[in-house]
Amino acid sequence: MKPDALTPAPPPVDEEDERRRPVRSFVLRAGRMGTGQMRALAELGPRFLIPYSSSPLDLDTAFGRASPRVLEIGFGMGAATAAIAQAHPETDYLGVEVHTPGVGALLKRIGELGLTNLRIIQHDAVEVLEYMLPDASLAGVHIFFPDPWHKKRHHKRRLIQPAFVALLAEKLKPSGYLHLATDWADYAEQMLAVLSAQPNLANTADGYAPRPEYRPLTKFEQRGMRLGHGVWDLIFRKA
């Protein structure tokens, strides 16, 4: 089989078990793995991938130092994540992603850029937050362009829901920030409503925030802006 063949299919789904699970905000899909991504997984995975565990993670041990920690949920192919980490070596970044091609792509960028302040957990972000991350351990959380689940009947799958935002707030340190971005207007409205209703979070702007310099524009975003599509950033801080 060639190195760029499709990644192995996930194991068969137990339908009864699935019915017992909470609604998830993602669907696992097979994706193509390039040679470089596969090599990065094999060579860099042992150093930069943190296995999921149901016990708390010692972040100082994981990163080998004590520094501010920022969590990114759903980093896609990791271009923005790597750019932010490269520009801010004084901060440690923990990326959580379920899709193997994206994990391989970010590991490849870590190797190319010589980054040491990035770690990855390939697992459901909700369970990572619930079981691995201590309360008041994060300086910030990034969630850029989560799946909008644009059909109304699928809105229940959207990641940004009151219970999830309450969980995020628990993991933030005092004055820690939560930064969301979306290019779907109705999702932006939902995000603003949910975050505004969280009692221990305060908006840093009057509604939506200007895009901060640290969040790089993606190619997809630049194309959308040329076509007149909107992008909405929200930045809230823990009181």
Image: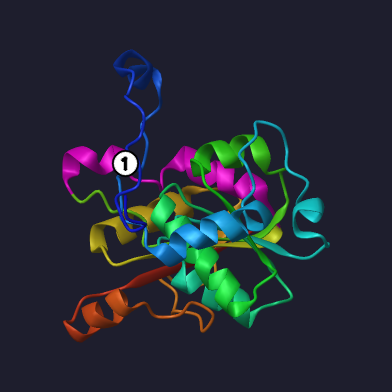
In the image as oriented, which residue stretches furthest toward the front? 1
**Observer-nearest of 67 and 38:** 38
Magenta-colored stretch includes residue 156: yes
| Image quadrant in which the C terminus is located | bottom right
Q: Position of residue 234 (x, y in %)?
A: 45, 66
**Observer-nearest of 20 and 169:** 20
Instruction: Identify which residue is drawn at 47% across, 73% down.
Output: 80
- Considering only vertical position in the picture, is 83 above or below 170? below
Q: In the displayed structure, does residue 225 sit left or right of residue 137? A: left
Q: In the displayed structure, does residue 150 sit left or right of residue 21? A: left
- Considering only vertical position in the picture, is 129 above or below 96? above
Instruction: Identify which residue is drawn at 31% across, 41% down.
Output: 27
How many numbered circles are shown?
1
- Considering only vertical position in the picture, is 168 above or below 113? above
Q: Amino acid at mark 1?
A: Val
Q: Position of residue 195 (x, y in %)?
A: 47, 53
Magenta-colored stretch includes residue 81: no
Q: Position of residue 175 (x, y in %)?
A: 69, 62
**Observer-nearest of 68 and 27:** 27
Which span of residues is magenta-colored? 151-173
* Element class at badge 1: loop
Question: Which quarter of the picture shows residue 10?
Answer: top left
Q: In the displayed structure, does residue 142 sit left or right of residue 227? A: right
**Observer-nearest of 195 and 83:** 83
The main secondary structure of the magenta stretch is helix
How many residues crowd around disc 1 within 10 Å: few (fewer than 14), some, or many (20 or more)? few
Question: Which quarter of the picture shows residue 170?
Answer: top right
The answer to whether any part of residue 75 appears in the image is: no
Q: Position of residue 193 (x, y in %)?
A: 39, 53
Which color scheme does this rendered protein use? rainbow
Instruction: Identify which residue is drawn at 45% across, 42% down.
Output: 162
- Residue holding disc 1: 27
